[in-house]
Image (cartoon, grey):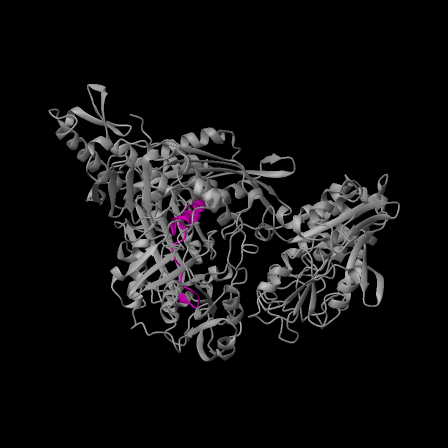
Amino acid sequence: MYPFTYVRGDDRQAAVALAAEPGTEFLAGGTDMLQLLKDEVRRPRRLVEITSLSGMSEISSGPQGLRLGALARMADVADHPAVRDEYPVISQALLASASPQVRNMATIGGNLLQRTRCAYFRDTAMPCNRREPGSGCSAIDGENRLHAVLGGSDHCIATHASDLAVALVACDAVVVVTGPSGEQRIKLEDLHLLPGETPEKETVLQPGDLITAVEVPPLAFARRSLYRKVRDRASFEFALAAAAVALDIDGGTIRQARVALGGVGTKPWRSHEAEKALTGAKLETASFEKAAAAALAAARPLHQNGFKIILAQRTLIRALLTVGA
Amino acid sequence: MTTTIGAPLNRIDARLKVTGAARYSAEMPVKNVAHAVLIQSTIANGRIADIDTAAAEQSPGVLLVMTHRNAPKLGGKQKSVQQPGEDYPLLQDDAIHYNGQHIGVLVAETFEAATHAARLVTVRYDEDKSVVRLGQVLDKLAVPQHFRGGARLPDSSRGNPDQEFVAAPVKIDQTYQTPIEHHNPLEPHAVIAVWTGDELVVFHSSQSVAGSHKTIAGHLGISDDKVRTVSHFIGGGFGSKGSTWPHVTIAAMAARIVNRPVKLVLTRRQMYTSNGFRPQTRQHLRLGADRDGRLIALRHDSLSHTASFGEWVEPCGLSTEIMYSCPNLGVSHRVAPTDTGIPTFMRAPGEASGMFALESAMDELAEALAIDPLELRLRNYAEQDEHEKLPWSSKSLKQCYERGAAAFGWNKRERQPGSMRNGDLFVGWGMASATYPMNRSKASATVRLQADGRAIVQCATQDIGTGTYTIIAQVAADAIGLPVERVTVQIGDSNFPEAPVSGGSQTAASVTPAVDAASRDIRKQLVDLATTGSFKGLRSEDLDVVDGAVVVKSDPSRRAEIGTLLAGRDALTATKGAEPGDEKKQFSMHSFGAHFVEVHVDPELGEVRVARYVGAFAAGRVLNAKTARSQIIGGIVYGLGMALTEETDLDHRSGRVLNGNIAEYLVPVHADVPDIEVILIEEQDPHVNPLGVKGMGELPMVGVAGAVANAVFHATGKRIRYLPIRPDKLLRTA
């Protein structure tokens, strides 16, 4: 671990001003940041701890939808009655994440900004374009069973790790950001960047930008939503493939759908292609299969992760079958 | 007289452990400790061209940066007395043999200062091509030179297996593979090295204090009696702490230079490059049978890999030699070097990996013949050891099969794969046999009975979490005639009477006979004393020791307390050794067991969940029903990890371990483990050793992976021959 100074932020504007300076990072629950610091994947000169900032931990719901403070703990959001009842996909995605101990510490904002689990990214002895631009991607010709089949480039194929982000992106969530230039609202779908030629740029956030809340607009049919995750062990493991789905059903027809995939994309993967295929379609397996094919149509397998294409399709079909039943 | 042997006593060290009072190696109270952090290579093969330590040496708090350039020369004595086939890298030259090899150590005032400064060391390498996978060295396979330290032959044969296989009416001919696995004890390897003059005390987490101090002394070129190893509590070892690995000696070397005690604790990531692993194996099984399922021919040919600097072979075929009745049988082991660290013993080395293959193949034979898998095993039941041509000292495998099957409800199994359901999930029932040899080595112990009526037992064994403290107290209590609360057990110190490595499931079988012998001697001394004192005129055989007092057998109300008898003396003391004789020339000694498992498989998503588990085991006499049961549950859980989740990922180009942490190296979590029903079948075996125990540490994990693979086949019709059984393999398999 490189030496750093530690500042406790008591005031939001002051914290943002500090974090806008070079070499500064925010520290919230720390469940990912501490690993990154210890492995020297991140070497900030200064950490601004934000967990005591006021007004950022509340969870509220109303006619405007759901508002999750960025410092709300994963466990609290998962157990919140409004989340459980009105957006089960969000609650389920959280409960399928990490372990109870981690969920008691980790925050919503931190979860969205967690870094990839790509082993090459997390080992400073190995080349990685995301960590060290221009050093090369070790995964493309290396061990890539766990890597992304959607959204990768010749420079990076690292999978985005968050389950929560997949559920939220399916629900059209918006992140509220306070930065040096004031407050802005960014669609979660637009928060994360594809790696392209600059995998080191993971989000559109600028230095000092602080996520203060996540807003989920009202989505009545989200009561009929679900998160299905497939992984290598029963719990406490990241997704091989996951699907967040919500269906608006009118008799035997699908009026609207929301679909996002986890474990297969370089970012939380909203699938407008699958949604389009489902809109107006009959509520039947054949429609789900078409949607699944559309969702993975652009998938690009590498030598070890090709199974994810079929697994993601089946996971999505299963989620749609379950929620449509 | 109440007997404590066999009773489900709580661990006598339980309170110390749950209150945190039990001190593990890194917690030993040593003053003025300096902290050491290892520097490890980032290539797999080549030489260090340059190593720049200037920045690290200037870093605040740094006391020493030791590399091959300034490390003390050890005179070429880099051998381990515990693994004679090895020649460890100990900072003696610039050669790199594997990725993660220790190339230096940094000592500083604090752990943080050392950790940071270690990162400031920059290394330039002359890198050579490397091969890190078994599949890359199949052209370099050779006959092992140090197989089982010379105790067994790498190849064995009876009858004419090749010819009879060809002629057999029913054949199975398949290859099974197991990946690299790491032990992952919860407690990391840790050492504090303390020099006083030319004498060294090493606190380190060791499965063998008695072997360790000799290895360290050998490395340092000093006499054994100058080195003392202490390991009071060990948070699991599973074989990784059976040998004394380079970091222990390196810590001692550094401590001598900085002239202060040095503490070195491996990080979790370093635990994947510093202390061995179960190597990758490929096992070719050929089974030939008649139409009734009786084995005619059986071949088990195993390949595994080792390091370039030493040989360690995974002995997959040894269980096969004795498991089933078969007149024509051949076993072979071949090994090839890779640019990896050296493998080592990992819980049931050879048995766990080999029985995965054999028990999978037996299941395939059962399927080919449409015979119930349990019935197939009964038809091939070995009534004697056909390898050694000896009778069993005891064998209760049939009872294990019967009672396990009854508890599981095996007779309700539908034979056809894919025919049982639980909702949308496919249900599979699988079974497998377990076997493990009864190992025993020479051991000795000292018992001291004090005038306050307490006994102290000393022995250079160690408790690696199995309950050794407790069973020693139980054996001593019964043998002397004391309540178990009055026995204090002192182990984990090489200054005590010698005992073997806690490996090969041999601790109970080796140590308790010595404890028993010394304790019986104490009892005799006590009774003899009584015949000259309190019960003058009575003969020894008229007296007994009951609940801590000498009593007259014919009138137990006549008692003499130990304090009275020992008046004017300090204590009675006895040191006794116990060792095996030639009983293994007359009997074959093995434990056996049977696994029955139910899995639920989602056939489309490839998810496998273990829903139900019954294990029945017979391993001689059970010294403590509670700790034995705990060991069995632990072994089965370890086996479930092997079956479903565990694999060390190596980058195939650099040999870098990619999942060197317990977030990404997947051991079972609670959600992966169902209720496990344990059935213990007691055996009276007078031949194995005076206590009649066979050992329980490794047996329960042998066969788990096979049973699970067989259950997955029964659920899905898909045969997965390469562990672990993960969703992608089920999806890829037709």
**Furthest residue toward right:** A63
- Between B523 and B77, the residue placed more toward the observer is B523
Q: What stretch is highlighted in magenta?
A: B337-361
- Asked if residue B622 can be seen in this view, the reply is no
* Quadrant in the rendering for residue A307: bottom right
What is the x, y in percent for residue B153? 28, 55
Q: Is residue A293 above or below residue A282?
A: below
The magenta stretch spans residue B581: no
Side of B131 relative to A69 (left or right):
left
Side of A296 relative to A1 (left or right):
right
- Asked if residue A105 can be seen in this view, the reply is yes
The magenta stretch spans residue B351: yes
* Quadrant in the rendering for residue B630: top left
What is the x, y in percent for residue B698? 39, 45
Side of B480 relative to B240 (left or right):
left
Side of A23 relative to B126 (left or right):
right
